[in-house]
Image: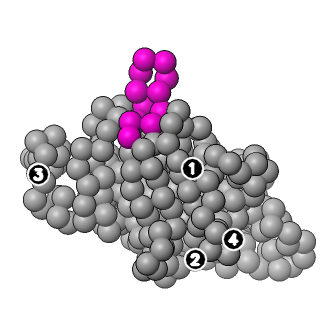
Amino acid sequence: MSDAPLLKVRDLSKCYGARIGCRDVSFDLYPGEVLAIVGESGSGKTTLLSCISTRLMPTTGVVEYRMRDGDLRDLARMSEAERRFLMRTDWGFVHQNPADGLRMAVSAGANVGERLMAIGNRHYGNIREAATGWLERVEIDRSRIDDQPRAFSGGMRQRLQIARNLVTSPRLVFMDEPTGGLDVSVQARLLDLVRGLVNDLGLSAIIVTHDLAVARLLSHRMMVMKDGRVIEQGLTDRVLDDPREPYTQLLVSSILQV
């Protein structure tokens, strides 16, 4: 991992009137590092992810991202066009519901190729070849390239969404409950795929999940949220094997009792 953070978050808060989405969150994320944000529903983890990824503007605080030229940029000071380009190129966002991250009425190949066209690729043959390669990489048979996502299973749609996000070689990927709603056997296959891709590509990732098994399998470091605040953070194995906060202990023990 590089000595310089890829992402710097300082005193980030989001309020909806009197209701707190997240409050005073600070952390650094380094190249090649995977951070899991865990907590129960309503803990603020999805709000935090939305603020970091500029899908929501925070009420207070700063999010800075290190560009490919090494310049650390304040995301709030970027133009809307700059942020959109970042989302299409250097970032990826994997939604819990694949339909939110795919164009359901176009082919699988077009879903993947669209990201390449957004960064200026125009050669149809090259785009189709890249799309085919990525479908195979996420374990979708190349013969399905012209099928629409609506003809795919939930697990296949999620794998297609991952291919769509990774085809432009992003450096940072956000994942919001990437295995939510999938059968256990499908979850295991998807997690194994994601772990392999993250390692092979040296990706940085921020993963929101309520599933501590997902956090243990995929992340280097973990933050536990409750009522909009980060109450505990550290290396994933340390937090899960030796939780210090009563709330974290309760989360861990509830999993062990299942």
Q: Quadrant of residue 145?
A: bottom right
* Amino acid bearing label 4: Thr
Q: Of label 3 and label 2, which has the lower sequence position?
A: 2
Q: Of label 1 and label 4, which has the lower sequence position?
A: 1
- The residue under label 1 is 53
Relative height, residue 241 to residue 30 (above, below):
above
- The residue under label 4 is 168
Q: Residue at x 15, y 49 (%)?
A: 252
Q: Name the quarter where the N terminus is drawn.
A: bottom left
Quote the CA–CA distance across marks 1 and 4. 17 Å
Classify mark 1: residues with Cα within 10 Å, few (<14), some (14-19) or many (20+): many
Foreground: disc 3 or disc 2: 3
Which residues lie in the magenta part? 13-24
Q: Of label 4 and label 3, which has the lower sequence position?
A: 4
* Amino acid bearing label 3: Arg
Q: Residue at x 17, y 46 (%)?
A: 248
- The residue under label 2 is 137
* Amino acid bearing label 2: Arg
Q: Is residue 130 magenta?
A: no
Quote the CA–CA distance across marks 3 and 2. 40 Å
- The residue under label 3 is 244
Q: Are marks 2 and 1 in contact (CB under 8 Å)?
A: no
Q: Which mark is residue 215?
A: none
User: For numbered disc 1, what is the local secondary structure?
Assistant: loop
Instruction: Decide which of 62, 49 is in the foreground and name it.
Output: 62
Instruction: Decide which of 38, 100 is in the foreground and name it.
Output: 38
User: For numbered disc 3, what is the local secondary structure?
Assistant: loop
Q: Of label 4 and label 2, which has the lower sequence position?
A: 2
